Image (cartoon, rainbow, N blue to C red):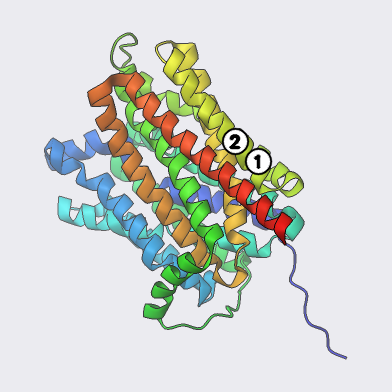
């Protein structure tokens, strides 16, 4: 009598490989930020022109979330990662050899597209994890994402200091090729159950938004708190380089090390979500985010106040992110890539809006006005989450 094969549980070595690959991949989106002065000097660019470089990278990443991420539901994610690894490696080599701004910007856009590897590995982790370990698995993968974002600027600056800015992308290309090979050899080859032509696949995301209230609510809550998070980080350097701090740009950059507290939030949330459930963890985490803006508003003119506020913010944001994504991935196992695409697209749109509005509010109302803006966004996120939970409890009682 034949037996249906049981999927092999996600092993610790494979999970570590995936988390490391996510860190190495997402770092490519941020390597160029501390290198902009050097790139500007190499190509003799104006201040306005050099801003095209980070914008091209983020636009490529956003385009990939919308147009490439959904493909994980209709084709082998391992094969898709193969193609993305080749694209990322070639794009980084093009950055290394770019002769002018047009080629450079095009190459960075392609780097953003290739960075979609991260958004393929997250659904793989969710699909391979045992139900009782899904939160812990997502916590580990998101820790890799956090480390990649936070350490990317330090790594690129250190390499460029000794070997020049182009060498950063030669090293990155080697890492992209290496992880492409390792993932090819170690990732399982999934067989998608969904079969849709590409236009219908993209259109189906709007159908998922209409169909699943939980997806809409998770995306809105996440968008609100991530807008608040980015409003703070977009204005922090402006605040600390002005009086009463008058720090240098290099000193302002060291606050990114304080943001490493987000790793703690991700790990704690990943461990506890499987025990206490996503809703409770999100409530506590959003309470920390609200508290952070209270601290920043009251004591943001002191170094201790800034550090405490940033720690609370990063622990809260990354602590809420894990259970929220676990909830999104649990809605429809056959549409995990599209669910993740909708969620992350809302996240990045909110990040851009929060950054722009935060800078604008600060220019008009100063630091305290910006912290009140962040507090309002965080408060709305917490209120929306609490109302949603109350409505869900009432619905369960009436059934």
Pick out the residue farthest to the front.
398
Taking depth in this image into account, of 293 and 160 the one nearest to the observer is 293
x 44%, y 63%: residue: 85
Disc 1 on helix, strand or loop?
helix
Q: Quadrant of the N terminus?
A: bottom right
From the top left corner, tell me how far across and down residue 37 is, in percent.
Answer: 22, 33
How far apart are the alpha carbons under marks 2 and 1?
6 Å
Taking depth in this image into account, of 258 and 28 the one nearest to the observer is 258
Pick out the residue farthest to the right.
1
| Numbered mark located on residue 285 in the image | 2
From the top left corner, tell me how far across and down residue 134 is, in percent.
Answer: 69, 55
Q: Is residue 280 visible?
A: yes
Q: Quadrant of residue 228?
A: top left
x 47%, y 35%: residue: 378
* Other residues around mark 2 within 10 Å, as few (<14) / some (14–19) / many (≥20): many
Disc 2 on helix, strand or loop?
helix
Q: Is residue 282 left or right of residue 310?
A: right
Q: Quadrant of residue 370?
A: top left
Is 285 drawn above or below residue 101 in the view shown?
above
Is 166 drawn above or below residue 11 in the view shown?
above
Pick out the residue farthest to the bottom.
1
Is 72 drawn above or below residue 4 in the view shown?
above
**Disc 2, disc 1: CB below 8 Å?**
yes
x 57%, y 53%: residue: 325
Taking depth in this image into account, of 230 and 182 the one nearest to the observer is 230
Q: Is residue 29 visible?
A: no
Q: Please give the residue where the numbered disc 1 appears in the rendered image.
A: 281
Pick out the residue farthest to the top.
244
* Other residues around mark 1 within 10 Å, as few (<14) / some (14–19) / many (≥20): many
From the top left corner, tell me how far across and down residue 277 is, in percent.
Answer: 71, 48
């Amino acid at each position: 009598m034949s037996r249906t094969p049981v999927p092999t549980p996600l092993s610790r070595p494979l999970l570590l490989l995936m988390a490391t690959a996510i860190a190495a991949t997402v770092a490519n989106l941020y390597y160029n930020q501390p290198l902009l002065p050097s790139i500007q000097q190499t190509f003799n660019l104006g201040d306005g022109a050099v801003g095209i470089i980070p914008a091209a990278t983020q636009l490529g990443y956003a385009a990939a979330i919308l147009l490439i991420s959904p493909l994980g539901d209709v084709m082998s994610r391992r094969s898709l990662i193969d193609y993305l690894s080749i694209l990322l490696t070639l794009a980084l080599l093009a950055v290394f050899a770019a002769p002018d701004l047009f080629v450079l910007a095009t190459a960075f856009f392609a780097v953003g597209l290739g960075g979609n590897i991260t958004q393929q590995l997250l659904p793989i982790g969710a699909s391979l994890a045992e139900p009782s370990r899904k939160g812990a698995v997502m916590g580990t993968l998101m820790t890799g994402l956090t480390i990649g974002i936070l350490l990317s600027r330090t790594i690129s600056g250190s390499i460029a200091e000794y070997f020049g800015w182009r060498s950063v992308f030669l090293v990155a290309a080697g890492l992209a090729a290496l992880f492409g090979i390792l993932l090819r050899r170690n990732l399982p080859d999934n067989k998608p159950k969904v079969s849709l032509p590409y236009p219908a696949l993209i259109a189906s995301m709007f159908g998922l938004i209409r169909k699943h209230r939980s997806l809409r609510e998770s995306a809105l809550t996440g968008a609100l708190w991530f807008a608040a998070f980015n409003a703070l980080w977009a204005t922090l350097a402006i605040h600390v380089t002005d009086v009463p701090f008058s720090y240098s740009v290099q000193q302002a950059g060291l606050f990114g090390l304080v943001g490493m507290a987000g790793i703690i939030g991700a790990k704690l949330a990943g461990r506890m979500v499987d025990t206490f459930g996503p809703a409770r963890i999100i409530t506590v985490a959003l309470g920390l985010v609200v508290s952070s803006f209270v601290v920043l508003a009251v004591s943001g003119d002191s170094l201790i106040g800034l550090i405490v506020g940033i720690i609370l913010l990063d622990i809260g944001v990354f602590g809420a992110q894990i259970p929220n994504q676990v909830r999104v991935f649990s809605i429809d196992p056959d549409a995990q890539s599209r669910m993740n695409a909708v969620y992350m697209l809302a996240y990045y749109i909110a990040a851009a809006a929060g950054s722009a509005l935060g800078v604008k509010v600060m220019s008009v109302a100063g630091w305290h006005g910006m912290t009140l803006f962040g507090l309002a966004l965080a408060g709305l996120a917490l209120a929306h989450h609490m109302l949603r939970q109350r409505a869900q409890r009432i619905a369960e009682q009436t059934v």
